[in-house]
Structures are given as C-alpha cells and as structure tokens.
Image (cartoon, rainbow, N blue to C red):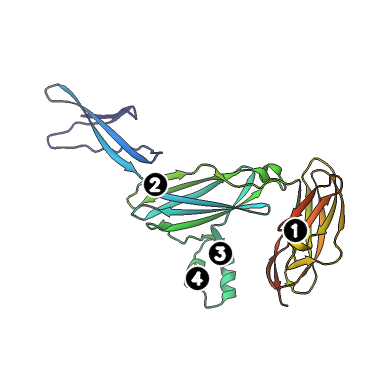
Amino acid sequence: MRCVSPRLRGWLCRAEIKDGGSVDTIVTHEVKEMGKHTLVCQVAYTTPEGFDVFFRKSFKFVIKNPLAVKTKVYNVEKEVFLEAQVQNLIAVPMLVESVRFDPNPLFTLSDLNSVNKSDIEEIRRRLGKDTPTGLAAIGDAGMGSISTMGRLPYINPNDIRQYLYRLTPKTPNDPLARAATVVGKLDISWKTSMGEQGRLQTSQLPRKVKAQSDLTLTATSVPGKIVIGKPFEVGCELSNLSDRRMSLRMVAVKSKMSDIVMNGISGQHLGEVNPEHRQTVTLSLFALTMGLHPITGLRVTDLISGRSYDIENLKDVLVTAS
C-alpha cells in the first residue's frame, strides 16, 4: 500500500500490509493561520488481484490561538522599555523553550529577565537571615545568571508570564532612533505536555513617537539626596537638533512651577549653540515640599527666531526632610 499527500508532493510511506495489519506515519506541517482547517489524506493501493484502487478522506479541525501576547512600550528619556505579557490559553501546561526579542537594528538590547548570582548574594546579605524562601532558593543555584521566571519554565493554563527588555540607541542622540516607530518583534517557541511544538512570531511592535522638537533639555546628573529647603544643582545637556544656529535664554515660568522652584534670578542666558551641537547647563533649584516631584516650568527661547520651547518634565526627584 502507498499513501500520498498532494500538499507535500510526494509519497509519505510505501508499505505492504498483511491481513489485519496497519501502518502509521507522521505528517508535519506548520500552520500559520488560526481558524478552521481541513487535512486531506489520499491512499492508493494495489489489491492482490492487481487492481489499482484510490480513495480520499478529509479530517476537519480548528486551530485556536494557544498564546495571548500583550505588549506595552514605554519611552523613558533616551531609552525604550518593552513589557510583554504571555498567557497560556490552552488547557494543559506549556513548556516555554525560548522567548527572544529581535530589536530594531538602531538599538542595543538589554534582556532584563535574569539576574546575576552576585547581585542576589548582595541582596541576601543586606536582608540578613530572614531572606524570603523564593529568593533563597534562587540564590542557591550554581549559575552565573538566573532567570527571574524560576527554574522550571512552565506556564500553567491561564497563567501569565511577564518579560521586560530595555532598548538603548546604538548612537547617542541618533535622530533616526528618536523617530523610529517600531522597536522589534518577539519570537516565542514552546512545547505542550504531549510534546507538540509551537512557535509564534509577532509583527514589528509599534511605539508612539512624540513630535520631534528642534531643542531638547535632558538631565544628566542629580544629587543623590535632596533636602527640603536647601538649594541643589542639576546638571543638564541642551541639544540643538535643528539645522540653524540658536541664541538661547532660559526663564522660569512661575505659574507652571509648584514644589520645585528656581533658586536665584530667572532669565539665564545660555549663549549660542550651533546646529547638531550640545551644551552643558547647570540649574540651581529649591524644594518647597517633601515627596516625589517633577522639575517643570522651564522655558528656553531662541532669541534669533523668537521661538520658545517649554520643558514639561525635566526629571522626577525625591525630596526628603533631612
């Protein structure tokens, strides 16, 4: 007896079957679409009398999505963070073989889903003997780095695993990286408890990009401790991203400042900045209340063009009592 699959264009098996016997074969085909599918099996055989016989049988089945993947993209200053939630939608446990993120070529990837054993030992040392059981178990592993998911990469039915990645532009202040609307794609491979293999590859994951400004102000250094009522300095980097020379002046907009205010006279002249150049700026500030507060209310004006740029949130700082 011979059996054939027209999709695979070839005989899957050739065998002689005795009375009451049978023959088994395995067909592997990657299914890329969800929904209803039909498997068509064709069998051609020759009877002992020499007659050629042919028949076909169809098997209908439904492919459901085994995984639910939800992603969130966060823009944090010059870096991008991707949060991915993977949920098992099937009724049996799933063994996750790999979760790989392929970044946009403009970025360098940092996988934040593992920790170094040395870092764990430092945490245990600081916590003392009352270390939580889970952390102690991970810290005892004889490995250089340990997955934050634990030792067994299983996802039980309806459970969710959360993954985190950090993307940093390969070239600092790269305008192409700042304007990139996609960050990369996820590639997930798994096996079920019955050994069935699966793979899911997402499309390019988008991110929302704010309209690019001709001028940016970024905090580069902040004191480790900020005390209420005492002046403190914040180091900043001012970047001219336009194609023209700017003569800049910074003022504090009192109506937009609340808990962090300017220390001293407003109206600092920052000098001239050429196109695609940066300049270092030091701000002297004063905290009025305790807590976590944003530095806002700064306005930079180009004296040549007359255009003003409002700095909505320069940096969040923590203010303490002493």
Left or right: 82, with 259 as reference point? left
Residue nearest the viewer, comparing 204 with 211: 211
Residue 103 visible: no
Amino acid type of disc 2? Asn
Secondary structure under the numbered disc 4 in the rendered image? helix
Report if the CB atoms under discs 3 and 1 are less than 8 Å apart. no
Distance from the alpha carbon under mark 4 to that under mark 1: 36 Å
Distance from the alpha carbon under mark 2 to that under mark 1: 45 Å
Amino acid type of disc 4? Ala
Looking at marks 2 and 4 on the same chain, the residue that comes earlier in the sequence is marked by: 2
Looking at marks 4 and 3 on the same chain, the residue that comes earlier in the sequence is marked by: 3
Amino acid type of disc 3? Lys
Left or right: 10, with 319 as reference point? left
Left or right: 11, with 134 as reference point? left
Secondary structure under the numbered disc 3 in the rendered image? helix
Q: Residues within 10 Å of mark 1 (few under 14, many from 20)?
A: few
Residue carrying label 2: 65
> Which residue is located at x 52 percent, y 51 percent?
71
Looking at marks 3 and 1 on the same chain, the residue that comes earlier in the sequence is marked by: 3
* In this view, 202 is above or below 231: above
Distance from the alpha carbon under mark 2 to that under mark 4: 37 Å
**Residue 44 percent coordinates (x, y):** 22, 26
Marks 3, 2: nearer the viewer: 2
Distance from the alpha carbon under mark 4 to that under mark 3: 11 Å
Looking at marks 3 and 2 on the same chain, the residue that comes earlier in the sequence is marked by: 2
**Residue 307 percent coordinates (x, y):** 81, 47
Residue carrying label 4: 136
Residue carrying label 3: 117
Residue 130 visible: yes
